[in-house]
Image (cartoon, rainbow, N blue to C red):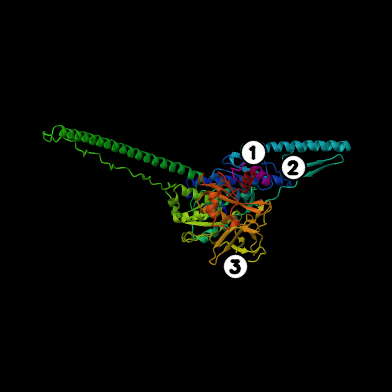
Amino acid sequence: MEQPLTYLQQRAGEDWLIGYDSHQFHCLTQQLFEQLVEMRRREDTETRGRGDTETRGHGDTETRGHGELTSHLVLSLPLKILLAEENPWEFLAAFLAAVSANCPVFLGNPHWVEREWQQVLDLVQPDLIFGGNLAGGRRQKAGGRRQKAGGRRQKAEGRRQEAEGRRQEAGGRRQKAEGRRQKAEGSFDEKIFTIINENQSLCLPASPRPRVPASIFIPTGGSSGKICFAAHSWQTLMASVAGFHQYFDQKPINSFCVLPLYHVSGLMQFLRSLSTGGRIVIMPFKALTGGRRQEAGGRRQEAGGRRQEAGGRRQKAGGRRQEAEGRRQEAEGRRQEAEGRRQEAEVNSPSIPNTQYPIPNTQYPIPNTQYPIPNSQFPIPNSQFPIPYSDIDPKEFFLSLVPTQLARLMSLDASAWLSRFRTVLLGGAPPWNSLLEQARRCKIPLAPTYGMTETASGIVTLKPDAFLGGNNSSGQVLPHAQVTIRSTTGETLKANQTGMITIQADSLALGYYPQPETLNPPSTTPNFPADDLGFFDEQGYLHIMGRRSKKIITGGENVFPAEVEAVIQATELVRDICVLGIPDDDWGQVVTAIYVPHASTVSPQLLAAAIEDKLSNYKRPKHWISVAKLPRNAQGKVNYEQLQAMVNGCLTI
């Protein structure tokens, strides 16, 4: 199997990184790789010189600035690298360098909050953090911990030596001298825990940090609020690439990446393009939508200004019509006055002939009341989504989105642009039916996908032709995977029978750090039970019903939140929705809907009425909670820990 640097060497001279200097990227990757190799060489030399295999302590962490890896310590184990670089090209260069140097690399979200960072640091205990925004404070904090630990070690060692000296004065002097020698020659390569009581003093070497096989660790578990890492290898990631390539019969694979690279869905887009000879655009989603929102807002304001201008012209024309009508009424008054004088003259002077008093023309020329008024539906300029990187042809590219991103782009008039792509992969969270129907009407070549971090992205995908033909399933299984539906007792179920989804795949993770090789031991039996329920139809298409862990049992009846959410979304009264089960003394759980209304007029009563004839009574929410925004992560997944806290706060008020 080809290794990362081999792929780069094969692509030397190609301009495949759109919007970035491909040659500069290759050079940076090689530079970082050589630095890591030199660290390993120094490590081996020092280890042979010392003749031991002691390792330094867990807390000894170094960080680096942009573009370089640094370490002032010689290590006897491969560097554990926590990769949290915001710059996408430096992130990818460091990733390829670390994998090529057989260093365990943990992908990190640079936007984790302090609590999450502390959780990750305690779990991973990295040797090096690659991310410029962490360098200052983290380095000082780690240095402070090292100094504090060193002070405790020295203090404990002093007490131990003093006690030993009282028992054996001669031996104490020798040990004191030895202690001074160790202090002069030693470093932080040892970590000593000292246990002291009034009867004895013991010197215990710390247990070595767990030996981690060189691998790739991708964060997951964000929806539960507890971060963990799925342990992958280069082989499992390349198996995912191979399955994707075979299923779509596409090589090279060009990617338009707007998803985070620390997430499996973003990383796999890069690896597909790297290993198949494809090109790639990397553009953060905020950068894609930020300018578009401003431009769309500007167009709306411009159109509004023109509508106001047209309204002003209409008012001006109306004023002219009123002025003309006033002149006509004035002329009619003069005519009536003349007619009155004429009649009076006839009565008083009957012998006087008819004077035919000249009456002003009653057909007073009135300006045309059909004043040409601009169309009140003033034409808005073409609001087609401005095309980023207009020199590329979208029909040659795969784009990956999560449902909330797709909805946002369509709201920004991007449907025509999206419809030009080769395929728009949609995953990360369940899409709602109204979103799928809207995308279908806009001829967007969607490919709804089922997969997870543990499977290195999608293992089930619906092809665009089937989607546009009306299929709303998650698709069919990719060549590198096997998916079965099983009962709670482990029996394989037939078509149209709902059960637990179980997976075996060449791309399946080895396990979770720090206990790898728990998910995918050598076996021919599907052995990874996903936390999802679904069924295969007779044509082999997978339909996802919802998560087992999110299933609500109310009054003995099973309720799947995904079904309730889809019905509420279809009312088009909410922008976002999540359904939970809340503990209840009478029912066990009650169905609770947390929603973001489309307008301030949307009330729980209105929503309840809208779904009354679409869901059985036990499936309808008993609590409706309106919020400004649901707590979702970058992949569109709900953070249920935060959501539960919001619900608890609302229901206890």
User: SS of the residue at dot 1?
Assistant: helix
Question: In the rendered view, would you say 77 is above or below 164?
Answer: below
Residue 428 image position (x, y, % from top left): 56, 53
In this picture, residue 296 sits left or right of residue 506 = left
Q: Is residue 523 left or right of residue 576?
A: right
Question: Which residue is tagged 2?
Answer: 191
The amino acid pointed to by label 2 is: Lys
Give the magenta-colored segment's residue range: 108-124
Instruction: Tell me the mark number nearer the camera, choosing from 2 and 1.
Output: 1
On the picture, is 295 further left or further right than 432? Answer: left
Q: CA distance from mark 3 to mark 2?
A: 57 Å
Which secondary structure, mark 2? loop
Q: Secondary structure at mark 3?
A: loop
Q: Look at the image and tell me in which quarter the N terminus lies.
A: bottom right
**Toward the viewer: 516 or 29?**
516
**Crowdedness near tag 3: few (<14), some (14–19) or many (≥20) residues, C-alpha within 10 Å:** some
- Tell which tag, 3 or 2, sits nearer the viewer: 3
Q: Amino acid at mark 3?
A: Lys
Residue where numbered disc 1 is placed: 138
In the picture, the disc for residue 494 is 3
